[in-house]
Amino acid sequence: MHNDFRSKLPLLLIFGLFSSFLPASGSVLCPAFASDEYYKVARNYGRDGRTGTDGRLGREGRSGENQNIFVNGSSVNLDLSGKNGEDGEDGEHGYQPDCHDQRDAYDVSHDINAPNGGNGGNGGKGGDGGNGGSLTVYYSNLADLRNISVRATGGEGGRGGRGGNGTQGCNCHRRSWEVKTCKGTPGSPDYQCTDKVYRCRDGSDGRDGSDGSDGSQGRLGTLSIVNSKKALAADSPTVQLAISELTNKQFHLSKNKWNLRKGAASLLAPGAAIADDYLEFEQRLEEAFQIVWQERQPITNFGNQAVTLNLTDSKQVEITFSEELWVEGSTKSEANLTTFTVNHAISKKDVTRLAVAEFADAGQNLNLKIVDLAAKSDAINTQFRVKFRTQDSLQGFSGYKTEYEGDIPNELVTRDYNRFTLALGKLKIPDEALRPGVNVDIEIVATRSLGIRSAKQTISWQGAIRKPR
């Protein structure tokens, strides 16, 4: 008795909820959830099959061990081979769609779609094979290398996993059906009914997953030889630091210089499995570096700007400054010490701070004065290019005609500390374009350079040529 009541309780609750939509007369009204929203959901009955999970990638094979050995004529047998990569996992098959009884899906006033099948998961990529290990041999007699048997092959790549199969879509049990729709009042002249045909479309089959690619073969190991009984010191060819850390210090850079040779297997015991290219130690390079600061601004003004020092195979120290810092200087090398003297250092933001100061006079005396607001023009090289246009009355108020476009010769540019005077009137510009009252549009492109760096700044000015005072 109690069990029967419990089993009927959900139905009673649903009936109670539904009865709230009944009017007092007992006639049935359609509830809100039975509106168009219900039929939008019902257009695809059932549930599509889910896509299968992709297979996991195969793990990469471990690379062979790197070894340093000192030879004395005794036989040596080494296996420095890389391990094989693991196979990728297969993709999971797609999941079946939910093709439940379709009878409830028919007799609706719209077409319906049967559920689609699930796609298969993709196969996982095979893991790459591990590389062969590197071998460094220290020797006194090169012939002793013939007693070294070495195998430093790369591991095989793992096979890619297979893609999972897609599943079939659901098929329609009924391909079409008719629904009668009536309008008007039965028995009246305006009452009419029409029959419309609706259809069911079969679900699509899920796609098969793609097979994973095979892993790559690992590389052969490499050989390096050193004619010495003592192990080489570690390289320290590069230093990166803030520029403020360079003052009053010497920095020591070092590196081992090697020559690239061919024929590694010919140096070792027959059957050696190793890369053909090998390295032969030539010499140890060591150099100290120091900076000499002669720029007027203290070096601490540029404290956070990065500087990189690098020792090359030609035993030269390359110094690279941040893009935000323009430096001009000279390098001197003597007795294993490289000195870099900084004559000028300028922040990039201060390079392009030119502005028009004055537009004066007319005719051949017409000039444009430009000021360097950063006051760095004693160090920076500056070249000017101009486009000089006048207002064309035939083109209306906004039209301009180009009278001259080109570089301004150096002899027509004078500099007084941080102020430039451009003698525009001395350019090949028609006299009528230089008369007082003429409206002009001037575009100046200044190219600023210091050392290996350069930048352009465009300065524009519009106005009328005024009568000389």
Image (spheres, rainbow, N blue to C red):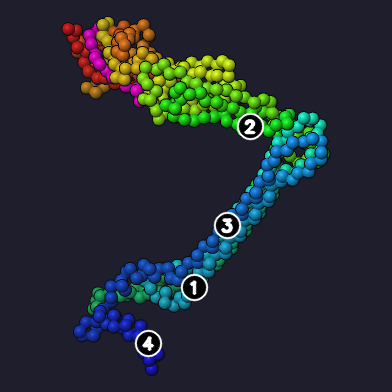
Position of residue 277 relative to residue 452, above or below, is below
Q: CA distance from mark 4 to mark 1?
A: 30 Å
Contact between marks 4 and 1 (CB within 8 A): the answer is no
Look at discs 1 and 2 and give the one toward the viewer: 2
In the rendered structure, which disc, 4 or 2, sits on the residue that comes first in sequence?
A: 4
The question of residue 231 being in magenta is answered with no
In the rendered structure, which disc, 4 or 1, sits on the residue that comes first in sequence?
A: 4
Residue 38, given in percent of the width and then of the height, sits at: 34, 70
Q: Secondary structure at mark 1?
A: loop
Residue 37, given in percent of the width and then of the height, sits at: 33, 68
Look at discs 3 and 2 and give the one toward the viewer: 2
Q: Give the quadrant of residue 383.
A: top left
Rendered-image quadrant of the C terminus: top left
Q: Secondary structure at mark 2?
A: loop
Binning the other alpha carbons within 10 Å of mark 4 as few (below 14), some (14 to 19) or many (20 upward) gives: few
Q: CA distance from mark 4 to mark 2?
A: 85 Å
In the image, which residues are magenta?
Answer: 349-363
Residue beneath label 3, please? 56
Q: CA distance from mark 3 to mark 2?
A: 43 Å
Binning the other alpha carbons within 10 Å of mark 3 as few (below 14), some (14 to 19) or many (20 upward) gives: some
Position of residue 105 relative to residue 375, above or below, is below
Task: Name the foreground residue: 224 vs 4.
Answer: 224
Residue beneath label 2, please? 233
Binning the other alpha carbons within 10 Å of mark 2 as few (below 14), some (14 to 19) or many (20 upward) gives: few
Q: Secondary structure at mark 4?
A: helix
Residue type (three-letter) at the residue carrying disc 4: Arg
Q: Residue at x 61, y 54 (%)?
A: 58
- Left or right of residue 300, residue 20 in this image: left
Residue type (three-letter) at the residue carrying disc 1: Cys
Residue beneath label 1, please? 99
